[in-house]
Image (spheres, rainbow, N blue to C red):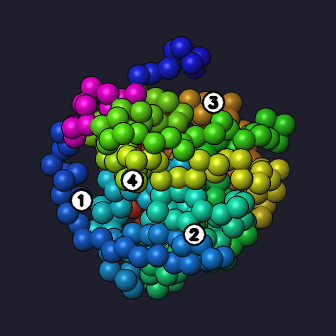
């Protein structure tokens, strides 16, 4: 999408006011939630959790420059099905601490540490679910630490042949200060950009992406996040061979990142894994179809937990 053809920021029409949300989401936000912080490599790792400790665990890993609140329309429903659901913030994002460098391997270990602290491992091995960038963290965890996991579920993370993989950092994001909350919300965009019908959910995650400082509001994530990330060459075939737990792959039916060529390539590499498509969803499928994603997670959990 050319710069001049970009979609307008979705929250401009609301001038800082909250769009009307459905009753079911209001009820989901009333679900009891526990918050805490783990620590690893002198970095705080914030987390939130739903459901009782001692129940089978689920770890939910958000995407790049996102935060744990992206799961707020999904996690309460999975927890009510009888699971301890934990959503941490990746280092450099959300309310977690920042580092001088970031690697996929350390992100994977961070998520295990946060999950252990929050009770995801109390009943044994949890299932890890990652969206977009979080899907690559999940794939890394499956290879390096998969013996600790029940399974990994990867949501709309395009796994391509090595010659087609990203080798340089995306543009710098964040770092700006806005005079008030309304001005900050008016600048919020999804990346990659897409229209998202549940604008009330976009508003919810946008508010959770900001912090108030003396001069106004700014984004929570490290603006040098991508420049600090050490990119690792990933061999998809090796990722498939090295996975120490079952994997499942999910895409949005209208995802701009998961077109037929990429999807077919992935199916040819991860031949023993289920591949699932969420209808009426784009890349940000956890916003487009949160209830469908919750049902999909519950189904995979029941299958893998029951066969353990």
Residue 161 marker: none
Measure how far apart labels 4 and 2 are at the Cα level. Answer: 31 Å
* First reached walking from the N terminus: tag 4 or tag 2: 2
Farthest residue in the left direction? 23
Q: Secondary structure at mark 1?
A: helix
Measure how far apart labels 3 and 2 are at the Cα level. Answer: 31 Å
Q: Secondary structure at mark 2?
A: helix
Q: Nearer the viewer, mark 1 or mark 3?
A: 1
**Badge 1 vs badge 2, beta-carbon distance below 8 Å:** no
Residue 203 appears at what percent x and percent y? 31, 41
- Decide whether residue 16 is among the magenta residues: yes
Q: Secondary structure at mark 4?
A: loop
Residue 164 appears at what percent x and percent y? 79, 35
Residue 201 appears at what percent x and percent y? 31, 43
Q: Which residue, given by chain and number where applicable, does mark 2 sit on?
A: 111
Label 3, residues with CA under 10 Å away: few <14, some 14-19, many ≥20: few
**Badge 1 vs badge 3, beta-carbon distance below 8 Å:** no
Q: Main secondary structure of the magenta part?
A: loop
The part of the chain drawn in magenta is 9-19
Relative horizontal placement of residue 296, taking residue 89 as reference (left or right): left
**Badge 3 vs badge 2, beta-carbon distance below 8 Å:** no
Relative horizontal placement of residue 84, taking residue 136 as reference (left or right): left
Q: Which residue, given by chain and number where applicable, does mark 3 sit on?
A: 260
- Decide whether residue 27 is among the magenta residues: no
Q: Which residue, given by chain and number where applicable, does mark 1 sit on?
A: 29
Measure how far apart labels 1 and 4 are at the Cα level. Answer: 29 Å
């Amino acid at each position: 999408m050319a710069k001049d053809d970009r979609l307008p920021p979705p929250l401009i029409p609301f001038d800082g006011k909250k769009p009307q949300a459905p009753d079911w989401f209001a009820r989901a936000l009333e679900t009891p939630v526990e918050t805490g912080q783990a620590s690893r490599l002198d970095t705080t790792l914030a987390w939130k959790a739903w459901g009782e400790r001692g129940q089978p665990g689920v770890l939910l890993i958000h995407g790049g420059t996102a935060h744990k609140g992206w799961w707020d329309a999904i996690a309460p429903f999975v927890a009510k099905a009888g699971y301890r659901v934990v959503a941490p913030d990746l280092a450099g994002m959300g309310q977690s601490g920042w580092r001088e460098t970031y690697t996929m391997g350390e992100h994977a270990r961070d998520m295990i540490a946060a999950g252990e602290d929050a009770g995801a491992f109390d009943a044994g091995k949890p299932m890890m679910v990652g969206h977009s960038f979080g899907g690559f963290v999940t794939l890394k965890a499956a290879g390096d630490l998969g013996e600790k996991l029940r399974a990994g579920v990867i949501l709309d993370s395009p796994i391509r042949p090595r010659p087609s993989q990203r080798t340089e950092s995306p543009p710098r994001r964040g770092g700006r200060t806005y005079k008030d909350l309304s001005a900050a919300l008016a600048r919020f965009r999804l990346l990659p950009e897409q229209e998202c019908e549940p604008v009330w959910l976009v508003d919810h995650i946008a508010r959770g992406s900001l912090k108030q400082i003396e001069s106004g509001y700014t984004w929570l994530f490290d603006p040098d996040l991508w420049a600090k990330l050490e990119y690792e060459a990933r061999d998809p075939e090796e990722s498939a061979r090295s996975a120490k737990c079952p994997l499942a792959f999910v895409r949005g039916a209208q995802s701009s990142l998961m077109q037929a060529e990429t999807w077919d390539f992935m199916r040819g590499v991860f031949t023993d894994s289920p591949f699932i498509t969420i209808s009426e969803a784009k890349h940000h499928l956890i916003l487009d179809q949160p209830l469908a994603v919750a049902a999909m997670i519950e189904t995979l959990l029941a299958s893998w937990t029951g066969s353990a």
